């Protein structure tokens, strides 16, 4: 594996060398990178050509006349207008008023919501802070933004007008250039696919699964594959794997299993009938089908566990704990993405000696239920890509759990966590939290938890950095659940360290393949995308596993981290963060054309709720990059749960936010 990486990097360096030589040839022939003959080649010297001087003078006169004519309009708010010319990479910027003016027989429409522009300017204390870039024809109003506003207006009841103003304030920048950006975006996608010829589409993956049988659906919905049990390890089906450019370096390739299914939400709220088609049972029904929905006995419902491990010696201990402490280990399948170098501990190796000499170890007993994807650690680009591969290992199990690689579970954890989830009555439940430290948490003799408290996700704020401002979770409050609650407690945020849900969550909200070198930010991406598809987050009533933190375990201080590869993939994280924030509408100040939209139909948002609805409800100002204080006061004592849980839909498919009036 290491030798193969070296070969790929040598090819990449050779390719870069050829590219540099090509640029030198262009300079020698008098052509710049855009294919335009430069000034030196036109004149045969280093002086500026007379023709360009004349063009510049004529353009200057035109601009002055244009501004003077428009400026005659009284009492109209100014607008920044940028005319980008491909003349040696320069651009011209000037101020014009907002309005409608007939010039030389042509109509120019400069459309901006003046009221919101004023509000934005006043809010930031500087009139130029929120001036909108560019212009757009009035008739070109984008329908998507109107739908987004309608969704938001539904929230708040009597406060609809206030909510509308807030939403318009959030999306005003997005409303500009929508037509232009859509054209650019489509062009970028076409160009990206042309430049990535090595890629095989997920349609190929679906075709590869046709021989196992596909549920064709009703002709308009995404077909749902057939799930079976036991599952053949994806590591034993490498002939079905697909080849993709490495997300951190397109000159290298990486082989990955195909997805079991594309997202099945079809940009609308799932029906209960459709949700029940996801999830296998260890025993088939009388027709031989393992997809029995909620008719499958609770103890026979399968559990898929995904673990991303980076050179972690404790990974094998975590896998052992999962099987040894489960009441029904026969229904569990663990998928590990093991990023290692020669000499590192391997996740599916037994703790003691070998399976030949010590065959009764859990890793040996359940070896066929452990699916390991091995990756050379120098190719690792962070947890998002590793967990993305883990999602590709899912094969239709009833429940899905995500865990860190250094976790110890409690006795009968599988029965406990399933019982907690089913107690919510919500098929869109995701139980998730930051885990408590292992020290003093588990009785070593019985394996039972010694704690009555658990953390709840409510403390989040903006932070800066090389990748720009983004939200990140802070330390979370840990306390006993309110005594009047008999189920897990609603919370706004999702956590990557522990997550337990129905299997359709991993199908509908897969980790984004195009987000290398992302650490902070993955939880915002998955959490908000899941919210828009209709999922609800709950803090468990009881902890079923505990985390080994480095501060309490000196041996963990020696475990390497993926950012030891940061120099090799420098700059990719900035682009990835721009995409991450763009998908969830968290950087409305940026043009849509400034980030990559490839395969947004798979890694994008849903249409059950909008990101703007989330931000209004929980106090996130994406324009100013501020999180309002006080959310934990609303969440941790159960106020959110009592106000929101009563709006769970009768069929158990998520909470109906159109009936919720609360906003922080």
Image (spheres, helix red, strand yellow):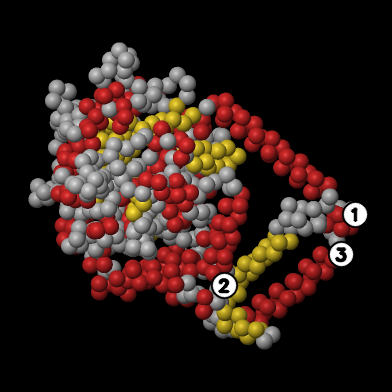
Determine the CA span between mark 1 and mark 2: 40 Å
In the foreground, 289 or 537: 289
Pointer 3 with pointer 1, Cβ within 8 A: no
Where does the image place residue 150, in percent across and percent down from the top left?
Answer: 35, 72
SS at circle 1: loop
On screen, residue 264 versus residue 5, left or right, reads: left
Question: How many numbered dots are placed on residues in this image?
Answer: 3
Disc on res. 604: none
Q: Tell me the crowding category of disc 2: few under 14, some 14 to 19, or many 20 or more residues within 10 angstroms, Cα based.
A: many
Q: Badge 1 is on which residue? A: 44
Which residue occupies 55% across, 38% down?
253
On screen, residue 51 versus residue 555, left or right, reads: right
Camera-nearest label, 3 or 1:
1
Q: Badge 2 is on which residue? A: 135
In the foreground, 357 or 567: 357
Reply above or below: 418 against 371.
Answer: below
SS at circle 2: loop
Which residue occupies 35% across, 36% down?
232
Disc on res. 50: 3
């Amino acid at each position: 594996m290491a030798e193969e990486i070296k070969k790929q990097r040598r090819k990449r360096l050779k390719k870069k060398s050829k590219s540099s030589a090509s640029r030198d040839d262009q300079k020698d022939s008098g052509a710049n990178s855009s294919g335009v003959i430069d000034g030196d080649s036109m004149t045969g010297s280093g002086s500026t050509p007379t023709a360009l001087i004349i063009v510049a003078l004529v353009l200057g006169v035109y601009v002055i006349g244009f501004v003077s004519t428009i400026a005659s309009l009284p009492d109209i708010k100014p607008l920044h207008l940028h005319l980008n010319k491909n003349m040696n990479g320069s651009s011209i910027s000037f101020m014009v008023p907002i309005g409608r003016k007939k010039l030389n027989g042509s109509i120019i429409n400069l459309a901006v919501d003046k009221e919101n522009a004023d509000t934005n300017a006043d809010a930031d204390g500087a009139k130029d802070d929120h001036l909108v870039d560019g212009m757009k024809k009035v008739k070109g109003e984008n329908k998507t933004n109107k739908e987004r506003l309608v969704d938001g207006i539904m929230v708040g009841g009597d406060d609809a007008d206030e909510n509308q103003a807030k939403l318009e304030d959030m999306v005003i920048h997005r409303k500009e250039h929508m037509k232009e950006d859509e054209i650019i975006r489509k062009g970028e996608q076409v160009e990206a696919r042309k430049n990535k010829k090595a890629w095989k589409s997920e349609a190929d993956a679906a075709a590869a699964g046709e021989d196992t049988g596909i549920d064709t659906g009703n002709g308009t919905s995404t077909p749902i594959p057939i799930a079976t049990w036991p599952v053949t390890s994806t590591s034993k089906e490498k002939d079905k794997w697909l080849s993709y450019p490495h997300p951190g370096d397109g000159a290298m390739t990486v082989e990955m299993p195909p997805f079991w299914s594309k997202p099945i939400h079809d940009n609308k709220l799932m029906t209960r009938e459709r949700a029940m088609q996801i999830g296998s049972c260890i025993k088939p029904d009388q027709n031989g089908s393992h997809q029995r929905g909620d008719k499958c006995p609770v103890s026979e419902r399968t559990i898929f566990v995904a673990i991303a491990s980076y050179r972690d010696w404790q990974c094998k201990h975590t896998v052992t704990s999962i099987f040894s402490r489960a009441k029904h280990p026969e229904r569990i399948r663990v998928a590990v993405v093991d990023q290692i170098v020669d000499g590192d501990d391997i996740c599916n190796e037994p703790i003691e000696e070998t399976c030949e000499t010590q065959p009764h170890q859990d890793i040996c007993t359940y070896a066929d239920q452990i699916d390991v994807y091995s990756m050379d650690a120098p190719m690792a680009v962070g947890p998002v890509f590793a967990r993305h591969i883990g999602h590709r290992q899912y094969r239709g199990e009833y429940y899905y759990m995500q865990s860190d690689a250094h976790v110890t579970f409690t006795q009968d954890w599988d029965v406990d966590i399933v019982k907690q989830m089913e107690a919510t009555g919500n098929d869109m439940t995701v139980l998730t939290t930051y885990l408590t430290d292992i020290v003093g948490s588990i009785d070593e003799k019985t394996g039972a938890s010694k704690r009555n408290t658990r953390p709840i996700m409510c403390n989040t704020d903006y932070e800066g950095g090389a990748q720009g401002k983004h939200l990140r979770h802070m330390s979370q409050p840990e306390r006993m659940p309110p005594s009047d609650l008999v189920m897990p407690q609603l919370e706004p945020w999702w956590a990557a360290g522990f997550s337990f849900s129905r299997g359709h969550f991993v199908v509908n909200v897969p980790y984004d393949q195009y987000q290398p070198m992302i650490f902070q930010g993955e939880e915002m991406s998955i959490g908000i995308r899941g919210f828009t598809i209709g999922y609800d987050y709950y803090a468990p009533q009881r902890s079923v596993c505990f985390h080994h933190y480095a501060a309490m375990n000196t041996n963990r201080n020696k475990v390497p981290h993926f950012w030891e590869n940061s120099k090799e993939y420098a700059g990719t994280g900035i682009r990835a963060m721009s995409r991450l924030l763009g998908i969830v509408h968290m950087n409305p100040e940026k043009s849509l054309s400034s980030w990559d939209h490839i395969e947004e139909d798979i890694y994008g948002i849903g249409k059950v709720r909008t990101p703007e609805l989330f931000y209004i409800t929980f106090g996130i100002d994406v324009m100013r990059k501020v999180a309002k204080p006080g959310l934990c006061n609303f969440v941790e004592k159960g106020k959110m749960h009592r106000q929101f849980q009563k709006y769970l839909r009768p069929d158990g498919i998520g909470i109906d936010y159109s009936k919720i009036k609360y906003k922080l």
